[in-house]
Amino acid sequence: MQTVTLNEPEITQAFDALPDDGKPVSMLNLLRYRERAEYVGHPEQPPCSGREAYTRYAELAFPIVSAVGARPIFIGTCIAHVVAPPSERWDDLLLVEYPTRRAFVDALTSKEYRAISFHRTAALQDSRLIAFRGGAVSFRMPGGF
């Protein structure tokens, strides 16, 4: 499996095409780490595990996303895949809220982010990035949740 890098033009174009109504948007990151990070094109990076490479990425990315007003909401380690295909396994999940869709796009397209995103690519065997908004669902919850 190949990890999709977050700075690929089709990803930002697809997200940029959504209407920007100024409301917050949350991004759910599902992460599966490589056993050993693959720093293709970056031989100067010391060898490490995928998890260690993601830590490098997170330390550099946090100030960038914070600068656009984003904040982590939840970070967790997956402990069981209760309802999932056998091939779909995740190590960690990360939930980040951005003040607007535009803030997310601005962070990802910044030259600062592009300069460090290779750590994410080196770290991850597979990932998912799912955008959503809280507070509205397409079904009715008992008790008016």
Image (tube, grey):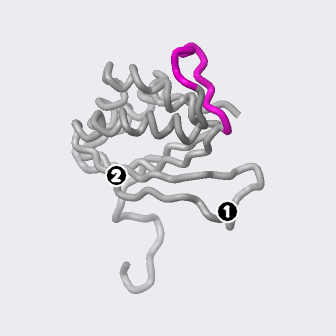
Label 1 secondary element: loop
Residue at image mark 1: 81
Task: Please indicate whether residue 136 sits to the left or right of residue 43 in the image.
Answer: left
Mark 2 is on which residue type? Pro
Badge 1 crowding class, 10 Å Cα cut-off, few under 14, some 14 to 19, many 20 or more, is few
Q: Quadrant of residue 112?
A: top left
Outermost residue toward the right in this view = 86
Q: Are marks 1 and 2 in contact (CB under 8 Å)?
A: no
Number of labels in the image equals 2
Mark 1 is on which residue type? His
Q: Position of residue 47 (x, y in %)?
A: 59, 27
Q: Earlier in the sequence, mark 1 or mark 2?
A: 2
Q: Quadrant of residue 102?
A: top left
Give residue 100's mark: none
Q: Quadrant of the N terminus?
A: top right
Q: CA distance from mark 1 to mark 2?
A: 23 Å
Residue at image mark 2: 72
Task: Please indicate whether residue 68 sits to the left or right of residue 31 in the image.
Answer: left
Q: Position of residue 127 (x, y in %)?
A: 58, 41
Badge 2 crowding class, 10 Å Cα cut-off, few under 14, some 14 to 19, many 20 or more, is some
Q: Position of residue 130 (x, y in %)?
A: 48, 47
User: Which residue is pictured at 77% across the width and 55% down the height?
Assistant: 86
Label 2 secondary element: strand
Q: Nearer the viewer, residue 126 or 35?
A: 35
User: Which residue is pictured at 75% across the width and 49% down the height?
Assistant: 87
Q: Which residues are magenta?
A: 35-46
Residue 71 belongs to magenta span:
no
User: Which residue is pictured at 57% across the width and 15% down the height?
Assistant: 43
Q: Position of residue 65 (x, y in %)?
A: 30, 38
